Structures are given as C-alpha cells and as structure tokens.
Image (spheres, rainbow, N blue to C red):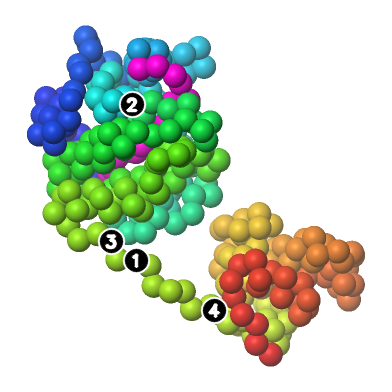
Amino acid sequence: MAAPLTADGFVSALRREGLVVVEYDGWRTNNRNHKGPWGAVHGVMLHHTVTYGTRATVDMCRYGHSALPGPLCHGVIAKDGAVHLVGYGRANHAGLGDPDVLGAVIAERRLPHDDQATVDGNRAFYGFECENLGDGEDPWPSVQVEAMEKASAAVCRAHGWGAGSILAHREWQPGKPDPAGPGMPTMDVLRSRAARRLGQLPPAPPPVPVKPVVSLSRLVKAAEADRFRAGTPVSYAGTAIVEAALVDEGLLAKRFLDGHYGWTTLEAMSAWQERCGYRGRQLGQPADGIPGRTSLTRLSLKHAFAIAA
C-alpha cells in the first residue's frame, strides 16, 4: 500500500531502469481523477492494446474512444521498447476485478484464480498498455518484452515492492486474455525476470500438490444431517473440498463455501448430478443432492481430489 509516485518520480524511475521514455504534452494532468481517487496503489498491471501501429496506439490510449474515455493507461510500451507517457492519475485500464487477487498482490503471494469483478482496479494499479493486435498471432519482440519487465520493475523498485506486485489484466478481471501471444512469456516467467532485476530471488515454484481426500461415507452423513441442523455447523470438513469444486463449476456461490452441507450445497450437488445425466430433484431420486460414487468421482477427476470409503 502506498501513495502514488509523483509524475516526476515516475518518469525518473523509468529512465533509471534504462528505458527510452517519450513524454506527450499534458500527460502529467491527463487523468480521470474526477471519477474517483487514484491510490492507495498496490501494483503494476500489464495489458495489450488490440491495435496496430505505435502512433494510432498512443492516440487511442491518450484520448480513449467513444465507449471508454482516456487516458486508458499511464504508459504505452511500443514494439520497439519505448515507453510513451500519455496520462498520470486515475486511468481507465483495469476496471473491476477480483478482491482475492488484490489481497494476494498486496501480500505478494501467488495469485488465485480470478472469478469475481467487484473491486475498483483503476484506483489501485499503475497501468501499461503494450502495443499488440491481441489476435494470438501478432508476435511480441524481445525488446518489447524486456521493456515490460523493466517498466514493471522500475515502479516496484521506486515503491520498495517485490515482483509479486506485478500482474496481467487476465489475472485480474475474469474473461480478459491479455497480454498473450507468440513471444510473450508467462506472467510467472516475467515476474521471475523482474525479481532478478530487482536483486531478489525468483519466487519458489509452488509445491507439488497433494490431492485432498474426501470420505464418501462421511460426506453422505453430512448431506443427510446438516440441512436439518440450526445455523451452519460443519459436521465433516471434507465438505468444503466438494463445495470448492461446485463453486468452480458455477453451481454454488462462493459465499456458501463454508463446509456446511446445507440446502444450498444440496441443490448445487443436485445440479451437478443432473449434468452427469441423472434426473429428479426430490429426495430419494438419482439427482437428489446426496452424493453418490459415480457423480462424486466425475467431480473429483475434474477438480483433483481423491475419494475414500
């Protein structure tokens, strides 16, 4: 968490990192601050523009378009690696994103999957738009990727942040693909490169996951008993493993991932059983929400948990 750098501090940080910086008239005061605050800032977000040509790309990011007023970022990173400064302050680049991702950026821990769009990212992040058609075919020159690494590291260095404060638009807002394409490394690789530039050790690779185990018999007992118990008691902790899988399937709202096999979880499991080809939602019917081995096995194969008796 930090107050944004001054505009002079921002451009100085970029140049100290060895970047070629192009300043446009009025960039220091081109912003959307009348729509809300910029800051506290927590990280650096990278995008691609879905445009062709540096001049057209810079103009679009500087002024915006009919559906989205500019500026659309703070800096445009061109194909040749130059950084074109078009705005400073609140910019229309991040939109709404996942609060769990924001928490992970703040803590500089591994980012979770983004599945919500409820938190204002325009307030919280610096934004660099990177010139690319975004069609999966337009290549990313190595000099441009290096500039993305340098620009991200420059801001992190100026704030005393680590490389865990760097993220992609696709890691923030569900449904966004950017940046991606031939020559674009994964974000884990780019963060590792930025970490080395910052004089840090690259993040350790995640541990090899050990599959959690769900007891079918204990899960059935929870399904049969929990819905009749007052409140949201947890009679079997393994219920939360199954609920997490149902959340990923879009069948259970995240707020109900509580380990309690209540009526809401029962309905979600019933919906999964119907996906598996069973019919009927009444108790005693094949899709009644009481877990069975066949439907639970199909869920476990998709979501990497094991089943015990």
The span from disc 1 to disc 3 (Cα, nearest Å) is: 6 Å
Q: Earlier in the sequence, mark 4 or mark 2?
A: 2
> For numbered disc 1, what is the local secondary structure?
loop
> For numbered disc 4, what is the local secondary structure?
loop
Residue 186, horizontal then vertical, whole percent: 40, 49
Q: Any mark on residue 203, and which? A: 3
Does 121 sit above or below residue 201?
Answer: above
Q: Is residue 8 magenta?
A: no
Which image quadrant is residue 149 in?
A: top left
Does 224 sit above or below residue 46?
Answer: below
Q: Earlier in the sequence, mark 3 or mark 4?
A: 3
Foreground label between 2 and 3: 2
Residue placed under numbered mark 1 in the picture: 205
Which region of the structure is painted magenta?
A: 39-54
Residue placed under numbered mark 4 in the picture: 212
Question: How many other residues sit within 10 Å of disc 2, few (<14), some (14-19) or many (≥20)?
Answer: many
Q: Along the line of sight, which residue is nearer the eye, 55 or 290?
A: 55
Is the residue under label 3 in contact with that under label 1 (CB below 8 Å)? yes
Does 173 sit above or below residue 254?
Answer: above
The span from disc 2 to disc 3 (Cα, nearest Å) is: 28 Å
Residue placed under numbered mark 2 in the picture: 79
Foreground label between 1 and 4: 1
How many marks overall? 4
